[in-house]
Image (cartoon, rainbow, N blue to C red):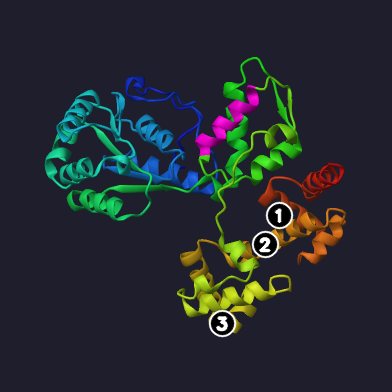
Amino acid sequence: MEDKMDFNNIKNTSNERYQSIHCAPIPLANSKPLNEIKEKITYASTINIPILISGEPGTEKRTIAKLVHEINQNSKGKIIFLPSYARTSNGFKSVLDEGIQAARNGTLVLSDVDSLTEEHKDFLTYVLANNDIYRRLEDSNIQLVVSTSEKSSNRSDILREALGGCMAHLELSIPPLSERPEDIFYYIDNFIDFYKGSNNLTLSDDAKALLYAYSWPGNVNELRNVVVQLISLKKSYICRDDVENLKLHEKKKTTLIESLYNKDISQFQKLHPSLYKSLVFISENFLEEITLEKIANNAFSSPSHLSYLFRSNLHASFKNILVELRILHAKTLIHNRPSLKITEVCMQSGFGDLSHFEKMFKRHTGSSPRVYRNIYREKNIASITQ
């Protein structure tokens, strides 16, 4: 049987001198995308090639860099995080040289290189495009990690080409927290446990539902800061009002599901014709009983090819899109008619089985339909009495 790495029991040996802020040593969550990253890191620990980590600001780039260092059996030295600021090119070169010396037999992390000035980016691109840097790293037994907040841009693509032009490298892309909501409660529980001190607190179901529904544009860093604010209230029980008082500001971003629900699908016309026809059909019929075979026939395609188009272009299956559309419709019904019975919401949203509806609703919203409905009932009562 193949040995499995225990990612939850890895010691922290990072050099705090190069860290600008204190980060809670919370293990990575266990959603499918992060588990895939862990598997790639396990592979990377057996060889020494540069690693490029990309992810929105606030995602777990730093934690993943530390994980790379900790599971690398050849890393007996320190992990050094180089800051993304320096006043001059000579200053940046000096910081880079100092970092290489300090990271001997360890890991060197070039943090958020997309935040460098254009002059420094040009210098770094030149450095990464030449073999000299890799010889120095190899001679000093150093694992190189480069992180960027830009998944794809002209500058990050140039960095990729610079890395790949000299040797193979491994890319790790971290999805934003909004695309893996199953990680939200994991981090909430861990941050509470780490920062609570002597304050044992509990979150109400309503409070959890609000936190789950928020889009977290600042990702895990924002979630951590919100949890700390809630803990600082010195309450043993956090309710919905406590979360609402934080006045979290949503940055509205139209999603695929919202576009389909509102039948605003002109933006998808450049997709494969069969996929576009399928999206039109789903948008118009998602409350009906439809199957992949039925959609494929309508789009003059085969079910297998259409399934491939969904996953390769939209990174989602037909079934997931259908369920999310129906859940959005259920939420809309509850918003507009909070007195509606849950069984009626279920039937009017295209679900034939109540237990399946409740399971899917909780998976996609973080709360049961009844808890979700109670929130809006209370809001309606409050607005009437004001």
- Within 10 Å of the Cα at label 3, are there few (<14), some (14-19), or many (20+) other Cα atoms? many
Residue drawn at point x = 26 percent, y = 39 percent: 48
Circles 3 and 2, Cβ within 8 Å, touching? The answer is no
The x, y position of residue 306, in whole percent, is: 53, 74
123 is higher (above) or lower (below) than 203: below
Query: Which residues are the magenta region?
Result: 220-232
The x, y position of residue 92, in whole percent, is: 20, 32
The answer to which quarter of the image holds residue 201 is top right
- Within 10 Å of the Cα at label 1, are there few (<14), some (14-19), or many (20+) other Cα atoms? some
Mark 2 = which residue? Answer: 323
As drawn, which residue projects farthest toward the top?
198
For marks 3 and 2, give the CA distance. Answer: 20 Å
Circles 3 and 1, Cβ within 8 Å, touching? The answer is no
**SS assignment at label 3:** loop
Of residues 335 and 81, the one nearer the viewer is 335
Q: Main secondary structure of the magenta part?
A: helix
Q: Which mark is residue 299?
A: 3
126 is higher (above) or lower (below) than 91: below
- Within 10 Å of the Cα at label 2, are there few (<14), some (14-19), or many (20+) other Cα atoms? many
The x, y position of residue 85, in whole percent, is: 28, 33
Mark 1 = which residue? Answer: 360
For marks 3 and 1, give the CA distance. Answer: 27 Å
| Mark closer to the chain start, 3 or 1 | 3
**SS assignment at label 2:** helix
Horizontal side, residue 215 vs residue 210: left or right: left
Q: Which mark is residue 175?
A: none
Amino acid carrying label 3: it is Ala
